[in-house]
Amino acid sequence: MNPSNLGGTFTPIGTSLNLKRMGYGTMQLPGTHVWGPPRDKDAALAVLREVIALGANHIDTAEFYGPSVSNQLIHEALSPYSDRLTIVTKVGFVRGDDTSWVPDLTPDGLKRAVHENLTSLGLETLDVVNLRLGGAYGPDDRPIAESLDALVELQRQGLIRHIGLSNVSPTQFAEAKSITTIVCVQNQYNLVKRDDDEFIDTLAAQGVAYVPFFPLGGFSPLQSSLLSQVADEAGATPKQVALAWLLQRSPNILVIAGTSSTTHLRENFAAAELVLSREQIAKLNSISQQVD
């Protein structure tokens, strides 16, 4: 693997960040249901160190992963941090004692979450903070000005460098853009769920990064069969093909597939070397239209 490539780089609008397009998401590091300590702490720390060893410089996390677990693991594994590393976190949820995910978009709640992220990551300033909106099934188009204003205030205080959005609609992005510079959007998108096709192209034209969550999707048997056919042609695994398709879909897409295994991490990163043919991309593009 060539660790210097990783799909090339992308610099979001309004930043000097030179982000490798293949990054890493930490959601799988905590225990079951993204709750409590990892099953194997040494393995979790090894994964984070391998991310850096492979050349990545973009890690996605959140205080509500654990809670605090992913952030504390990042701090233990990687601090003192390289100047080249960008840590992106999210605010907008807290965790209930029953492991539930509870929205908290109040200004006080968001400010508290930013300070908690600073503490658990051991930072004085957060590189990028994504405002996580909506529910479990996608954006809900609620007004976001009050919540966003709270983050802008913290940005003016020097606690946040850049602001992004997560789980948002084009309407919410337009509202947010009228308030401050938005450097990235993190939404659900993959070979199967392609509601954001037009949105991605709009963001690319504006220099805004797009970060798909759940990048490997949930495939039906027929869709899995078509994906496996392309994978066999490409000499790769289905997961690698799905990630490579994302990287070739648009230059502003940054991939943050997560894993708790160094072996799987290397497999994911190897997807950045895979070049799909036009014919293979056409087959993959048809997957979202296939139903059993």
Image (cartoon, rainbow, N blue to C red):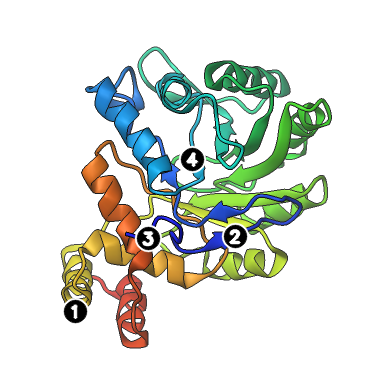
**What residue is shown at x 58% (from left), y 39% (from top)?**
133
Estimate the x, y position of residue 36 in percent, counting from the top left: 33, 17
- Amino acid type of the residue that numbered disc 3 sits on in the rendered structure: Asn
Give the crowd class for mark 1: few <14, some 14-19, many >=20 residues within 10 Å: few
Separation of residues labelled 4 and 3 (CA atoms): 19 Å
Estimate the x, y position of residue 152 in percent, counting from the top left: 79, 34
**What residue is shown at x 28% (from left), y 21% (from top)?**
41
Tell me, for residue 18, which label it has, or none: none
User: Is residue 243 visible in this depiction of the protein?
Assistant: no
> Reading the chain from its start, which is encountered first: label 4 or label 3?
3
Separation of residues labelled 4 and 2 (CA atoms): 14 Å
- Amino acid type of the residue that numbered disc 1 sits on in the rendered structure: Glu
> Reading the chain from its start, which is encountered first: label 4 or label 1?
4
Q: Are marks 4 and 3 in contact (CB under 8 Å)?
A: no
Q: Which residue is mark 2?
A: 10
Element at badge 2?
A: strand
Q: Are marks 4 and 2 in contact (CB under 8 Å)?
A: no
Q: In terms of image quadrants, where is residue 46?
A: top left
> Reading the chain from its start, which is encountered first: label 1 or label 3?
3
Give the crowd class for mark 2: few <14, some 14-19, many >=20 residues within 10 Å: some
Q: Which residue is mark 1?
A: 233
Tell me, for residue 59, which label it has, or none: 4
> Reading the chain from its start, which is encountered first: label 3 or label 2?
3
Q: Which residue is mark 3?
A: 2
76 lies left or right of 223: right
- Amino acid type of the residue that numbered disc 2 sits on in the rendered structure: Phe
